[in-house]
């Protein structure tokens, strides 16, 4: 029974999404789980910064300006997000390191400045063509999806 109802809940979310629905990291969703956010963001740091952040607990809340080189738009990012985008995500192994499907997609959005992508585009970028349905099911399950959510129409912001 429990399994059946969880499948039903995943399906109902999936019905509201389509293969051409663009996804991004919904940082508003993460706002409500600050502790998990810090823990999860730290897990994507490079070795150098993993070490640095262990010794500098207080920097997490610091906000920094980040300029999107494509749009010229200035965004306020927290220190963790800023460090990932300006340093760790630039390392080649950031996207090639073995990781779960959700982690790979999350890293892709960190690296691309959270530009929305559809399931089809995601599959292509992470070299998982033919696995669109698996990606779709993973993103449809909020307990797995790490804040990777459909872009709300009219939200206007990617960060
Ligand atoms: Zn780094």
Image (cartoon, rainbow, N blue to C red):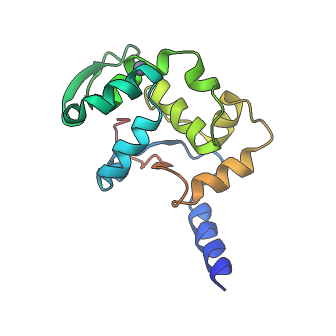
Count of number-bearing discs:
0
Residue found at x 27% / y 29%? 55
Front-lying residue, 43 or 55:
55
In the figure, is residue 113 to the left or right of 127? left
In the depicted view, which residue is nearer to us: 41 or 155?
41
Q: Is 137 left or right of 29, judged from the image as shown?
A: right
Asked where in the image residue 67 lies, by quadrant, the reply is top left
Q: Nearer the viewer, residue 48 or 93?
A: 48
- Residue 129 locus on image (x, y percent): 77, 35
State the residue at coordinates (37%, 51%): 36
Q: Residue at x 56, y 40 (%)?
A: 103
Can you say which quadrant of the picture contains the C terminus?
top left
State the image coordinates of residue 119 (x, y, percent, origin top left).
64, 42
Q: Quadrant of residue 57?
A: top left
The quarter of the picture showing ligand 1 = top left
Placement of 93 over or under 157, stated as above or below: above
């Amino acid at each position: 029974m429990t399994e059946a109802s969880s499948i039903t809940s995943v399906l109902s979310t999936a019905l509201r999404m389509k293969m051409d629905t663009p996804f991004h990291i919904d940082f508003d969703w993460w706002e409500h789980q600050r502790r998990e956010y810090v823990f999860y963001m730290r897990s994507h740091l490079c070795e150098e910064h993993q070490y640095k952040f262990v010794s500098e607990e207080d920097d997490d809340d610091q906000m920094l300006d980040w300029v999107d080189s494509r749009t010229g738009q200035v965004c306020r990012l927290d220190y963790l997000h800023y460090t990932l985008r300006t340093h760790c995500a630039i390392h080649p192994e950031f996207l090639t390191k073995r990781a779960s499907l959700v982690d790979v997609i999350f890293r892709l959005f960190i690296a691309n400045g959270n530009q929305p992508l559809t399931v089809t585009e995601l599959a292509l970028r992470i070299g998982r063509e033919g696995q669109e349905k698996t990606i779709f099911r993973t993103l449809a399950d909020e307990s797995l999806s790490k804040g990777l959510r459909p872009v709300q129409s009219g939200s206007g912001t990617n960060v």
